[in-house]
């Protein structure tokens, strides 16, 4: 049947009508005239030959870009990694969770790889970026959440929160800029820092987390201003999620005696009437990573269902 429909997919008319002619003629030799005379005439009459079909081109928004996503093995990082790969990027999944990170990289094929990275360790950053080659996009997503008021949180807990959420972002920006400046394609790139709604609105029981995410918010602006005034072509923006339904949330709900009440409380803080999905944060990260945001730097992008209104 290749003589009629070719190696490419047929249009709907060919596949639904002409194919019936072909099958009938092959099954019933007396009907062979359908194959010999009728089908070719119909093809020419309607100009539905597969080789004349209009070609559709899928635009890959991150094609030929390389991204590094910290905390990429799970939660928001997992969603961002998957979306970036779907949009054509080569993605380095950087995490301390080797098991899940390697499994995700394996699942995504040759467009993803894993790098063991503790974001609070300077030597880890220098090693990973030296091995990775030129980077176009860095997503500083790795973070922890320390619960407790100013009276409850210990100094050790406070320092650990800042080591991961602030020092990790500081190192990612510092060494990310150095890598992007040295890119053979020319200086430029996008750095995306994961802050939080808690970085702009305080809560009594999140003293360390509030302080850390507020620091990320202003560090982002400082980095953006520095890169802009130096003419590096490197953008830096922060994302501020509201409550997002990740596996961590499910773990929290499993530990409380009144999960339905807790969940309803989270929903009530969002005027839009629900909590967010990881894919919605990934969509914002995609915009900031792509060339569509070329005129955007130093911004706070709140994906919080209206909570900050």
Image (cartoon, rainbow, N blue to C red):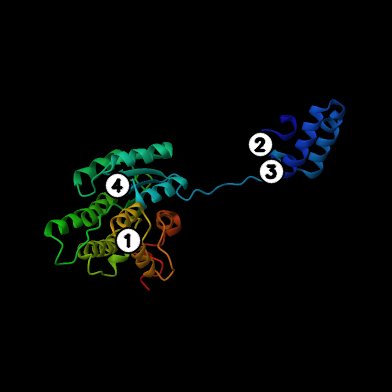
- Say which element carries label 1: helix
Which residue does the numbered mark 2 point to in the structure image? 8
Q: Is 38 left, or right, of 223 in this rendering?
A: right
Q: Nearer the N terminus, badge 4 or badge 1?
A: 4
Q: Nearer the N terminus, badge 4 or badge 2?
A: 2
The residue depicted at 26 percent of the width and 62 percent of the height is 213
Q: Residues within 10 Å of mark 3 (few under 14, many from 20)?
A: few
Q: Quadrant of the N terminus?
A: top right
Mark 2 or mark 1, which is nearer to you?
2
Which residue does the numbered mark 4 point to in the structure image? 179
Q: Nearer the N terminus, badge 2 or badge 3?
A: 2
The answer to which image quadrant residue 163 occupies is: bottom left
Which residue does the numbered mark 1 point to in the structure image? 228
Say if residue 99 shows up in the picture.
yes
Kindly report the distance in space between the C-alpha atoms of the residues bearing marks 4 and 2. Answer: 43 Å
Q: Nearer the N terminus, badge 2 or badge 1?
A: 2
Q: Are marks 4 and 3 in contact (CB under 8 Å)?
A: no
Kindly report the distance in space between the C-alpha atoms of the residues bearing marks 4 and 1. Answer: 16 Å
Compared with 10, 289 (above or below) is below
Q: Is 170 left, or right, of 136 in this rendering?
A: left
- Say which element carries label 3: loop
Kindly report the distance in space between the C-alpha atoms of the residues bearing marks 4 and 3. Answer: 44 Å
Q: Nearer the N terminus, badge 3 or badge 1?
A: 3
Mark seen at residue 53: 3
Q: Nearer the N terminus, badge 4 or badge 3?
A: 3
Q: Residues within 10 Å of mark 4 (few under 14, many from 20)?
A: many
């Amino acid at each position: 049947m290749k003589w009629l429909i070719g190696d490419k997919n047929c249009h709907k008319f060919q596949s639904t009508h002409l194919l019936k002619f072909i099958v009938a003629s092959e099954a019933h030799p007396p009907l062979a005239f359908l194959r010999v005379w009728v089908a070719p005439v119909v093809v020419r009459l309607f100009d539905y030959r597969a080789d004349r079909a209009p070609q559709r081109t899928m635009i890959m928004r991150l094609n030929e870009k390389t991204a590094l996503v910290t905390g990429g093995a799970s939660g928001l990082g997992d969603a961002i990694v998957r979306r970036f790969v779907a949009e054509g990027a080569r993605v380095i999944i950087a995490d301390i969770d080797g098991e899940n990170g390697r499994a995700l990289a394996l699942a995504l094929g040759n467009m993803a790889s894993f790098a063991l990275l503790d974001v609070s360790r300077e030597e880890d950053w220098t090693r990973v970026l030296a091995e990775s080659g030129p980077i176009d996009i860095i997503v500083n997503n790795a973070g922890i959440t320390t619960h407790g008021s100013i009276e409850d949180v210990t100094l050790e807990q406070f320092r650990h929160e800042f080591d991961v959420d602030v020092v990790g972002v500081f190192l990612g920006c510092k060494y990310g800029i150095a890598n992007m400046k040295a890119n053979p394609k020319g200086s430029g790139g996008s750095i995306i820092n994961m802050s939080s709604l808690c970085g702009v609105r305080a809560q009594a029981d999140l003293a360390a987390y509030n302080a850390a995410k507020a620091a990320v918010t202003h560090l982002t602006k400082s980095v953006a201003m520095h890169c802009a005034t130096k003419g590096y072509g490197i953008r830096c923006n922060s994302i501020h999620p509201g409550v997002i339904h990740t596996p961590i949330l499910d773990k929290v709900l499993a530990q409380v005696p009144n999960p339905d009440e807790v969940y309803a409380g989270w929903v009530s803080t969002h005027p839009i009437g629900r909590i967010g999905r990881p894919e919605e944060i990934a969509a914002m990260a995609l915009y900031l990573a792509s060339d569509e945001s070329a005129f955007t730097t130093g911004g706070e992008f709140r994906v919080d269902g209206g909570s900050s209104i």
